[in-house]
């Protein structure tokens, strides 16, 4: 990807958000809780649940950076400052990439299946 394409994708996620797929509203709250746990575990930033659909991401020194909102299965970002925003933003995108991976299914070779007992 070129710098222009990366810049375009970042601007697009900030403007339109990220679609999380069809899920029930209760799953939104669970998503925010697991995102907050992921951010707090890494100890680079702090994450605080504001309400059922909003997460506040802060710097280590409690400076508010941005809100993460979920509404209608869309994750949106509301920047509060320009400073230190990008690192925290990338951490959220890293979590999205981590959770969207599907486990690889191992292929079973036909030779490995023992059907002699049938």
Image: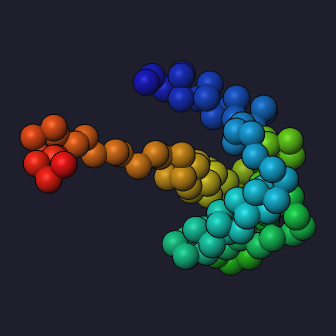
Q: Nearer the viewer, residue 79 or 77?
A: 77
Vertical side of 34 occupied by 98: above or below:
above
Q: Position of residue 1 (x, y in %)?
A: 43, 24
Q: Nearer the viewer, residue 1 or 99?
A: 99
Q: Position of residue 68 (x, y in %)?
A: 77, 54
Q: Residue furthest right?
A: 51
* Residue 85 can be seen in this image: yes
Q: Is residue 71 left or right of residue 99?
A: right
Q: Nearer the viewer, residue 113 or 65?
A: 113
Q: Nearer the viewer, residue 46 or 71?
A: 71
Tell me which residue sits at (75%, 46%) in the image. 23
Q: Residue furthest front?
A: 118
Q: Is residue 42 left or right of residue 115?
A: right
Display colour scheme: rainbow
Tell me which residue sits at (65%, 63%) in the image. 35
Q: Position of residue 71 (x, y in %)?
A: 86, 46
* Residue 114 can be seen in this image: no
Q: How many marks?
A: 0
Tell me which residue sits at (82%, 59%) in the image. 26
Q: Position of residue 37 (x, y in %)?
A: 63, 72
Q: Is residue 51 left or right of residue 43?
A: right
Tell me which residue sits at (86%, 58%) in the image. 53
Vertical side of 2 occupied by 23: above or below:
below
Q: Quadrant of residue 65?
A: bottom right
């Amino acid at each position: 990807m070129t710098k222009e394409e990366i810049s375009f994708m970042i601007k697009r996620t900030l403007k339109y958000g990220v679609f999380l797929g069809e899920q029930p509203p209760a799953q939104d709250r669970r998503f925010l809780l697991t995102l907050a746990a992921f951010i707090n575990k890494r100890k680079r930033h702090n994450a605080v649940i504001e309400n059922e659909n909003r997460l506040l991401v802060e710097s280590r020194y409690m400076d508010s950076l941005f809100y993460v909102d979920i509404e209608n299965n869309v994750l949106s970002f509301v920047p509060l400052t320009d400073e230190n925003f990008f690192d925290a933003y990338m951490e959220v995108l890293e979590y999205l990439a981590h959770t969207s991976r599907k486990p690889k299914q191992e292929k079973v070779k036909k030779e490995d299946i023992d059907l002699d007992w049938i």
